[in-house]
Image (spheres, rainbow, N blue to C red):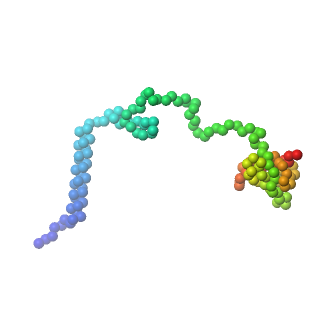
Amino acid sequence: MAKSQETYSKKEKESKKLKKRQEKEEKKAERKAGGKKSFEDMIAYVDEFGNLTDTPPDPKKKKELNLEDIQLGAKIEAAIDPADLIRRGNISFFNEEKGYGFIRDEKSQESVFFHVNGLSTPVKEKDKVTFETEMGQKGLNAIKVTVVV
């Protein structure tokens, strides 16, 4: 007796193909029976909570927005007062040989680096000074450092 040429895996593949084909035919028939959907049926709305719904929003809950209140892009900051740029502090460390030091800010108590190139008048440790800051490579740098009498 001769053995059948069909193996179990071949039968399984054929049955899967047949099942897929039947499902496809069923979906096709379902679409034809349903007819065309109108544009109104395809519209989705977003409610006040950000959820998608098929019902249009209530016109009574509509809010009016002023176009000038909508801001596009980065926020424009108010101009800085020149008096706020000048800070006060004490020189906590100064190395004359290397030409740098640190100023302890009176308000924020942070240390700000300064170099002798940023000095307006000669200074020494524990002097009270006024200064302006600028952003350097490693953080804030004090410039226009002057001794307060």
- Name which residue lies at 43% across and 37% down: 46
Q: Nearer the viewer, residue 130 or 79?
A: 130
- Name which residue lies at 72% across and 39% down: 80
Residue extending farthest to the left is 1
- Name which residue lies at 76% across and 39% down: 82
Q: Position of residue 4 (x, y in %)?
A: 16, 67
* As drawn, 43 above or below 2: above
* As drawn, 115 above or below 77: below
* Residue 141 visible in this rendered orientation of the protein: no
Q: Nearer the viewer, residue 127 or 117?
A: 127
Asked if residue 135 lies left or right of residue 22, the reply is: right
Q: Position of residue 52 (x, y in %)?
A: 40, 39
Asked if residue 128 lies left or right of residue 32, the reply is: right
Q: Position of residue 1 (x, y in %)?
A: 11, 72
* As drawn, 94 above or below 1: above
Q: Nearer the viewer, residue 53 or 115?
A: 53
Residue extending farthest to the top is 60
* Residue 124 visible in this rendered orientation of the protein: yes
Q: Position of residue 76 (x, y in %)?
A: 64, 38
- Name which residue lies at 39% across and 32% down: 56
